Each structure stands twice: as structure tokens, then as C-alpha cells.
Image: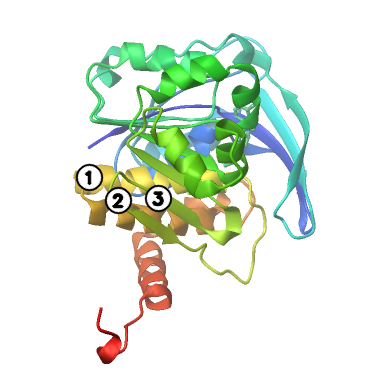
């Protein structure tokens, strides 16, 4: 089943302690599609300027990403640049140049409007609401956001939360949104405002899934080489949604497994700059890492534990 994603398609300039990439492929929709398309078809809606190297996206088209909703407008593409600290856990945004993204109003092609699975990448909540007005009857809608929108578009964001099934945020965003430093209470606060499910990402320290009935924690996959954390969150979302759309169910076990696929796809994203790692990533490598994940996290209680 196809997934509709709406988000940024960017050119990123990224500096990490290990090197630098200039004007590399980036953006939430790009990272999401690179990961989700390893599970099934994806429909992408976004905008680029007339300076965008569209040919560089052909690997996505070859993998079943429908780019019919990718507008090319006159002007400069969205550009983001950032620099990472030595431990790669914090980053500073050096520049955000909106270019054609400033006037972006997502237009969902008729053929995409009956999407069952929808991912609203991190864009203005106003635009995310606009997307929901254009899709007919999605079965599952997930959305991302960021500190900027929590600051300046809080009311619209709260309106959006009433209309989505899942919110994915990092721990700082969950605290900022709820005004509570305690993550368990922050989670309850957020879920009381609409989303049935919530994922709080904690970077290399993993992610927590909250459902109405349970809480599930998955660690980050321990890697020896971490090169560039950009896009890990969107790749996580791509792996998570990709697995759900592929299995077509939303049982507790499916959601938990989807978190593992999210964590695994996020871990591949950081191994190279930009979306490079996804270009030759095979389903076998994904399954091997999922199995390794299970090996590292499963344990038995002693037989006399009485539980
Ligand atoms: P992540 O590391 O998962 O938070 O995603 C990083 C990606 O988000 C980069 O590729 C950027 O191009 C993109 N990005 C950064 N700031 C924004 C923004 N304000 N709106 C949309 N996309 C952004």
C-alpha cells in the first residue's frame, strides 16, 4: 500500500567532525522516501527550485517513489546548513534559506488523494492541515514538527494534533510542547490533545512508543561509525511507516516492530552523508540488522521469578 509524504526537499550543507558535504540531497521528504521506498511505493509532494539537480532523485523514482507531486518552481531551492558537535548529539543550524519553499502550498495530485498512509513531514502546521483537507479518508496519519512551530504556530499545531493518529517528536520538543520536563507526563499531555499514538525520539539513545495501552522502548542501534546524523528522524519515520504500510495492520506487535524498523533505518541514515547509504541498501541488510537488534534486546526472566 502506497504512502503519501509531504515535506521539504532540500539541499543541505553539513559539517561534522568527520567531514563536510555541500549542497547534498536533503529535506524531510527526501530522507523519508529514501527509507520508506525500501518497503513499498511512496508518493512524494514537495517543491524544488529551478536550480535543483532533479536527476539526483532518479534513484528514488527507480525504487517506486512517484514524483508527480514534486513541483519545480522558479527560484532557489530550500537550503539548510548545520554543524554538529564532536559527540554528534547536538547541532547548530547555521542557515535556513527558504527560497521557493516560502510560497509552498502543497497541492495533492488527484491520484494521491485516496492515500491510506500519510506522513506529514516537518513543515508549517498550517500547510500540514491543508494537506489533510485534500486527502479523502486516510487510515493512518503521522506527523512531525519542530521547536519553531511549537513557538510560533502553537494553536494551529494543537488543531493538527486533533486530526492525526501519531505524532513523532524528539524529547526536547515533547518537553517544549507540553511544558513538562517529565517525559511520561509530557506524553500523556500530548496524547490528551488528540494523537492515539506518540513516539518520542531520543537520538542515539533510542525511541519510546506510547499507545493507549502500553509503552515500548527501543534503544538506538549501537554503531561504530556514525558519520552524519542529519535525516535520522525522517529515516526513522520512513522505516516505521514503511513497515506498517507493508504489513497493513496496527496491532500492538506491528507498532512495536515498526519502531524497530524505524530505529534500524535511522541507524543506516547516519552511516554516510545525505541519503548516500540508502542508494545501495538491500532488504537483506535491513533484515540482518533487525535480527541483530532482537538479539541485543531480548532476555529471559529466571524460571523462579514468579512473573
Ligand atoms: P532531521 O535530522 O531528521 O531533523 O532532518 C533534517 C532535515 O530537515 C535536513 O535535511 C533539512 O534539509 C531539513 N530541514 C531543516 N530545517 C527545516 C525546516 N525549517 N523546514 C523543513 N525542513 C527542514
Q: Earlier in the sequence, mark 3 or mark 1?
A: 3
- Looking at the image, is mark 3 or mark 1 nearer the viewer? 3
Q: Residue at x 64, y 67 (%)?
A: 225
Applied colour scheme:
rainbow
- Residue at disc 3, secondary structure: strand
Residue toward you, 1 or 64: 1
Q: Is residue 103 left or right of residue 83?
A: left
Check contact, mark 2 vs mark 1: CB within 8 A.
Answer: yes
Question: Which corner quadrant of the figure contains ligand 1?
Answer: top right
Q: Which mark is residue 255?
A: 2
Left or right for 169, reference 287: right
Please name the residue that numbered disc 1 is placed on: 250
Q: Are marks 3 and 1 in contact (CB under 8 Å)?
A: no
**SS for dot 1:** loop
The residue tagged 3 is 209
Q: CA distance from mark 2 to mark 1?
A: 6 Å
Give the residue at x 41% y 41%: 198
Mark count: 3
SS at mark 2 in the image: helix
Q: Nearer the viewer, residue 198 or 193?
A: 193
Quadrant position of the C terminus in the picture: bottom left
Relative to 240, is 43 above or below? above
Q: Which mark is residue 152?
A: none
For the point 43% across and 20% down, the residue is 160
Within-10-Å neighbours for mark 2: few <14, some 14–19, many 20+: many
- Contact? badges 3 and 2 (CB < 8 Å): yes
* Residue 307 visible in the shown view: yes
Quarter of the image for residue 131 reads: top left
Q: Position of residue 281 (x, y in %)?
A: 44, 57
Q: Is residue 78 left or right of residue 85?
A: left
Q: Quadrant of the N terminus?
A: top left
Amino acid at each position: 500500500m502506497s504512502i503519501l509524504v509531504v515535506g521539504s526537499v532540500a539541499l543541505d550543507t553539513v559539517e561534522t567532525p568527520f567531514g563536510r558535504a555541500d549542497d547534498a540531497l536533503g529535506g524531510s521528504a527526501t530522507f523519508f522516501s529514501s527509507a520508506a521506498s525500501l518497503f513499498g511505493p511512496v508518493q512524494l509532494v514537495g517543491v524544488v527550485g529551478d536550480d535543483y539537480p532533479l536527476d539526483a532523485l532518479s534513484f528514488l523514482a527507480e525504487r517506486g517513489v512517484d514524483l508527480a507531486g514534486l513541483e519545480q518552481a522558479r527560484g532557489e531551492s530550500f537550503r539548510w546548513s548545520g554543524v554538529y558537535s564532536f559527540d554528534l548529539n547536538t547541532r547548530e543550524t547555521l542557515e535556513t534559506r527558504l527560497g521557493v519553499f516560502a510560497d509552498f502550498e502543497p497541492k495533492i495530485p488527484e491520484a494521491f488523494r485516496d492515500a491510506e498512509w500519510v506522513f506529514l513531514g516537518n513543515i508549517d502546521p498550517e500547510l500540514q492541515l491543508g494537506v489533510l483537507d485534500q486527502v479523502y479518508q486516510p487510515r493512518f496519519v503521522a506527523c512531525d514538527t519542530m521547536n519553531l512551530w511549537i513557538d510560533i504556530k502553537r494553536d494551529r499545531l494543537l488543531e493538527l494534533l486533533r486530526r492525526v493518529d501519531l505524532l513523532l517528536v524528539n524529547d526536547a520538543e515533547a518537553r517544549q510542547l507540553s511544558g513538562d520536563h517529565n517525559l511520561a507526563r509530557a506524553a500523556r499531555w500530548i496524547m490528551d490533545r488528540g494523537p492515539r499514538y506518540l513516539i518520542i525520539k531520543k537520538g542515539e539513545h533510542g525511541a519510546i512508543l506510547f499507545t493507549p495501552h502500553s509503552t515500548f522502548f527501543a534503544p538506538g542501534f549501537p554503531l561504530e561509525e556514525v558519520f552524519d546524523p542529519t535525516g535520522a528522524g525522517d529515516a526513522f519515520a520512513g522505516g516505521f511507516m514503511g513497515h506498517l504500510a507493508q504489513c497493513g495492520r496496527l496491532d500492538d506487535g506491528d507498532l512495536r516492530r515498526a519502531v524497530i524498523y524505524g530505529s534500524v533505518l535511522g541507524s543506516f541514515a547516519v552511516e554516510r552523508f545525505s541519503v548516500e547509504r540508502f542508494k545501495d541498501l538491500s532488504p537483506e541488510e535491513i533484515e540482518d540488522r533487525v535480527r541483530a537488534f532482537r538479539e541485543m534486546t531480548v532476555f529471559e526472566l529466571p524460571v523462579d521469578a514468579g512473573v
